[in-house]
Amino acid sequence: MMSTTDQVTQAVQQFAAAFSDQGLARELAGGFSCTEVEAIFAVLHTAGAAEAAQMWVEIHAEHDEPGDQHSATETEPEPYPEPMVDPMDLLQCDSCQ
């Protein structure tokens, strides 16, 4: 009988072998949340499949919305709105002008 540690190691290796497939990642990664993809990344990376782990994040990022954790697109922050009136004009003092 295998020890629990050996069983876990075997299961992680089996998971890594199955989830290292690019076709599977392309089919599923966009449907997973960022948290779920991070979990897949952790298991694959721990199993020694670092390239497959990174592949899942990159494919998932193609489907993320701007602002999501893995978003492949960078968005410009909203510019700070310019004041309608110069605050110094509101003070109405000669030394402020």
Image (cartoon, rainbow, N blue to C red):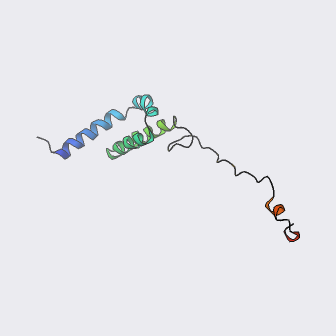
Quadrant in the picture for residue 17:
top left
The mark tally for this picture is 0
Would residue 50 appear left or right of 3 to someone viewing this image? right
Q: Where is residue 84 in the image (x, y as percent from the top left)?
A: 79, 52
In the rendered image, the quadrant that contains the N terminus is top left
Q: Position of residue 27 (x, y in %)?
A: 43, 28
Is residue 49 among the parts visible in the rendering? no
Q: Where is residue 83 in the image (x, y as percent from the top left)?
A: 76, 54
Would residue 82 appear left or right of 53 to someone viewing this image? right
Furthest-bottom residue in view? 95
Would residue 5 appear left or right of 37 to someone viewing this image? left
Q: Nearer the viewer, residue 31 or 48?
A: 31
Q: Nearer the viewer, residue 93 or 47?
A: 93
Which residue is pictured at 27% across the width and 36% down the height? Answer: 14
- Is 84 situated above or below 37? below
Q: Nearer the viewer, residue 31 or 26?
A: 31
Is residue 71 among the parts visible in the rendering? yes
Which residue is pictured at 45% across the width and 30% down the height? Answer: 26
Q: Position of residue 10 (x, y in %)?
A: 23, 40
Which residue is pictured at 34% across the width and 43% down the height? Answer: 43
Quadrant in the picture for residue 8:
top left
Quadrant in the picture for residue 66:
top right
Furthest-left residue in view? 1
In the rendered image, the quadrant that contains the C terminus is bottom right
